[in-house]
Image (cartoon, rainbow, N blue to C red):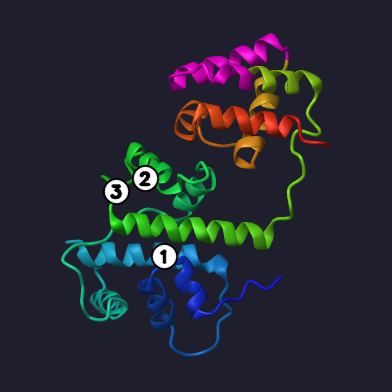
């Protein structure tokens, strides 16, 4: 597996400023750079920009001047009037990974605003979401093997609970309704919450854990969630 990338590749997943930071931070010697390094440089640029706009200065005057100069070079000596949107790159990528297909931008923006990570949507935030979503898919395809049917190893009680939940979820109108439907399915089918939630998240987001189920279902759409669960249950093992 080759995770090396060109500058053109980098710009498909991250900002030009992060690429300039990579180049200006160390101008001698060779480095092995891969797609896995992109979140580090995106977040480091955010930290550099926050420092630049902060009223607090480093007690080491030389260090402060060096970091200010580094920031100015990364923005081509044309600093903006105010800092851009700052939110951890991996947080955005993680949210994008669990977003409903076809609604990544809306889902991630809504979740970031709800979590207080950003005040509202913006073109800058939209670009970051697009970069991080693309990065997450690229890393997933490069590193992870193809998935098998994740319900194949579930016990009969858990499978019954999943089917009962799928049938009930279309009648849910609030996140609280969804949570109640999930726990009711667990209780009625005599499985455990750990087994049920591991199975349902595996189907919905491809991992054994995920965002709180109620808000996720409301964002994704109850009908789509039901369809996805039933499709997984009916998939040949």
Which disc, if any, is residue 83?
A: none
Which range is magenta? Answer: 165-190
Determine which residue is flagged by label 3.
121
Compared with 13, 233 (above or below) is above
Viewer-nearest residue: 88 or 100: 100
Which residue shows up at 56% across the image and 37% down it?
210
Whether residues under marks 3 and 2 lie with C-beta atoms below 8 angstroms apart, the answer is: yes
Which residue shows up at 35% across the image and 73% down it?
17
* Farthest-out residue, right: 237
Residue 58 point in image, percent of width and height: 25, 68
**Of pointers 3 and 2, the one earlier in the residue sequence:** 2
Compared with 4, 195 (above or below) is above
Determine which residue is flagged by label 2.
109
Callout 2: 10 Å neighbours few (<14), some, many (20+)? Answer: many
Tell me the element at label 3: loop
Quarter placement of the C terminus: top right
Residue 125 point in image, percent of width and height: 33, 55
Q: CA distance from mark 3 to mark 2?
A: 6 Å
Whether residues under marks 1 and 2 lie with C-beta atoms below 8 angstroms apart, the answer is: no
Decide if residue 57 is in sight here: no
């Amino acid at each position: 597996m080759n995770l090396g990338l060109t500058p053109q590749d980098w710009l498909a997943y991250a900002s030009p400023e992060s690429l300039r930071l990579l180049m200006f931070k160390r101008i001698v010697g060779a480095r092995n750079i891969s797609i896995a390094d992109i979140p580090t440089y995106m977040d480091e640029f955010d930290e550099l920009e926050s420092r630049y706009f902060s009223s607090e200065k480093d007690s080491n005057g030389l260090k402060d001047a060096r970091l200010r100069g580094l920031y100015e070079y990364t923005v081509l000596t044309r600093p903006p009037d105010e800092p851009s949107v700052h939110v951890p790159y991996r947080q955005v990528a993680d949210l994008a990974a669990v977003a409903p297909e076809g609604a990544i931008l809306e889902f991630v923006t809504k979740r970031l605003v709800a979590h207080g990570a950003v005040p509202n949507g913006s073109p800058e935030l939209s670009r970051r979401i697009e970069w991080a979503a693309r990065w997450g898919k690229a890393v997933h395809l490069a590193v992870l093997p193809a998935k098998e049917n994740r319900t194949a190893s579930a016990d009969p009680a858990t499978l019954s609970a999943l089917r009962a939940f799928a049938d009930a979820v279309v009648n849910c109108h609030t996140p609280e309704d969804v949570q109640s439907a999930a726990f009711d399915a667990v209780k009625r089918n005599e499985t455990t919450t750990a087994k049920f939630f591991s199975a349902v998240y595996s189907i919905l987001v491809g991992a054994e854990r995920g965002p709180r189920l109620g808000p996720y279902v409301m964002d994704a759409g109850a009908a789509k969630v039901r369809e996805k669960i039933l499709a997984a249950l009916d998939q040949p093992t």
